[in-house]
Image (cartoon, rainbow, N blue to C red):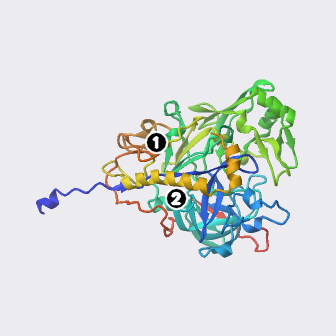
Amino acid sequence: MSLQKTLHRRKPEYIPTPFNFLPSGIFEGNDGFWSTFIIRVGTPAQTFRVLISTAGQETWIPLVDGCADFDPLNCGALRGVQDFQNAPSGGFKTNLSSTWELINLYKLALEDQMDGYTGNGLYGFETVGLQIQNSGGLTLNHSIVAGIGTKHFMLGVFGLGPKTTNFDDFNDPQPSFMWNLKNQSLIPSLSYGYYAGASYDKTPASLVLGGYDTSQFDTSKVPSIKFNIDPLYALPVAIQVVQASGTLNGVVTLLPEGIMARIDSTIPEIWLPIAACEKFERSFGLHMDNATGRYLVNDTIHTRLKELNPVITFKLGNQTYGGETLNIVLPYSAFDLQVNYPIYPNATNYFPLRRAMNDSQYVIGRTFLQEAYLIVDYERQNFSITQRISKASSTPEIVPILSTSYHPGSTRLHQSSKVGIAVGVVVGCLLVISGLAVWYWIRRRRNEREGVVSAEELQTQEEPKAVDNMTELSSPGAPVWEAPGNTSTRSHELDSAPVLEMGNRELNHLRVELPGTEPSSTLRLQNSRMSI
């Protein structure tokens, strides 16, 4: 062997950077004002403002048939549908997309057990992109998309889960959007950091795919507790205590005993046992509307609660009693919501609490994530929750979560990818602002309201160690701070791995099949004559 070969060393190799998915800048919805995200579907692209689902793995968008003659003239806009071909659109028009591949009509399975959140979806394969065109977003071909007509989900949904989708009339599990991003080296790992945003203090949502944003929380006050992801990729937590101060009855304990619940941002409310809901009723003066299952707040009580400004604290742990815990504190503003068409004809004050009929309905919904930052690492099967900062920095501090397939050594983030993040942020913000219709701009100006762990705490200097089926996020090297453009990306040195060069993030990519052992969500075929 020649000396040259003997002394040969592999060049440093690269890993993909996290993707900072920019919010639309609009707060909207028929069950509260929620911070939405823009996705592109089809060819040519039809654009939609959607909500994030921490429980699902699919992309759902309103179909044009979902808006009927009896609906308001702006039905499509109320459902997050943006103008298409310079005209208002009522929803996704499959016949105008050259890349739509119909599968069939199936029942939406995600929230089957939750009252009032059901419906059917017209499923197909389609091209899906994140953010508006030419903004540095990610685009994948042949993604699972469901066109929905039901107004149980007024806005579309973008799922963050890695679970496959299987259709009961053929055995061919289809990978999720997130799994394909990771498999095609567009993000460093199957992970994300998410905060739902809060209209009451003008704070937009934050979503990082393959990492998290430390500007969203106080890294010096992060609980060390980690939670285990269950085998079906749900996010279970124990609610040990719910306590409120400043209520109509002063300081009260609202949860009779600890329960296990799951975090699910697909739905807005917090679903608790009936006994707990009755305590809320007395402490907040709530009135149950049996026709809709919603808790309403009359004008007198609403005014009084705003004066009192109660604070509600959730004490969470891995078990219903004892062990390590953390507190997430929510102001009354987080529960001071309005429900609108089509649930009620006019805006009506409501409190986002629902009665759970059994333990399968114990859910911590989107309301909770107005004050909590969530980091989910599917590869290590754990997640973290921390209190968000009320006024986060306008400059993201993005930290990648590295895949378990990477090892300490010489691998590093590609410089062009770092610059690409910064450019994407700037371009995306400008295009989002300029591309929105005038009335949305006015609404945004009127309504928009301006955790996770430090790198040293969340990531360790050694290989991950499993403890009770839970693993810490690893960080093999000291943080290196970089500030390309308006975004800081904290990177970590890794050892040799296959070169993962990053090109144009908007390139289309072929699908790759998942291993057959992955957990799968099976959808039931519906009669084609049934309503969408």
Q: Is residue 125 above or below residue 268?
A: below
Along the viewing direction, whichever of 410 and 504 lies nearer the viewer: 504
Residue 12 percent across, percent down from the top left: 29, 54
Q: Is residue 463 left or right of residue 388?
A: left
Q: Is residue 391 left or right of residue 72?
A: left
Report whether residue 418 is seen: yes
Question: Where does label 1 land, which residue?
Answer: 472
Q: Amino acid under label 2? A: Gly
**SS assignment at label 1:** loop
Question: Where does label 2 land, which residue?
Answer: 137
Dot placed on the residue nearer the N-terminal end, 2 or 1: 2
Q: Amino acid under label 1? A: Glu
The C terminus - image quarter: bottom right
The N terminus - image quarter: bottom left
**SS assignment at label 2:** loop
Q: For the point 44% across and 62% down, which residue is it?
A: 504
Mark 1: few/some/many CA within 10 Å (<14, 14-19, 20+): many
Residue 364 percent across, percent down from the top left: 68, 43
Along the viewing direction, whichever of 176 and 60 lies nearer the viewer: 60
Q: For the point 54% across and 39% down, which residue is it?
A: 216
Q: Quadrant of residue 150?
A: bottom right
Mark 2: few/some/many CA within 10 Å (<14, 14-19, 20+): many
Residue 356 percent across, percent down from the top left: 77, 45
Q: For the point 51% across and 62% down, which residue is it?
A: 180
The mark total stands at: 2
Between the residue at mark 2 and the residue at mark 1, the CA separation in whole angstroms equals: 30 Å
Q: Quadrant of residue 362?
A: top right
Q: Nearer the viewer, mark 2 or mark 1?
A: 2
Q: Which mark is residue 274?
A: none
Q: Are marks 2 and 1 in contact (CB under 8 Å)?
A: no
Report whether residue 57 is seen: no
Residue 244 percent across, percent down from the top left: 72, 28
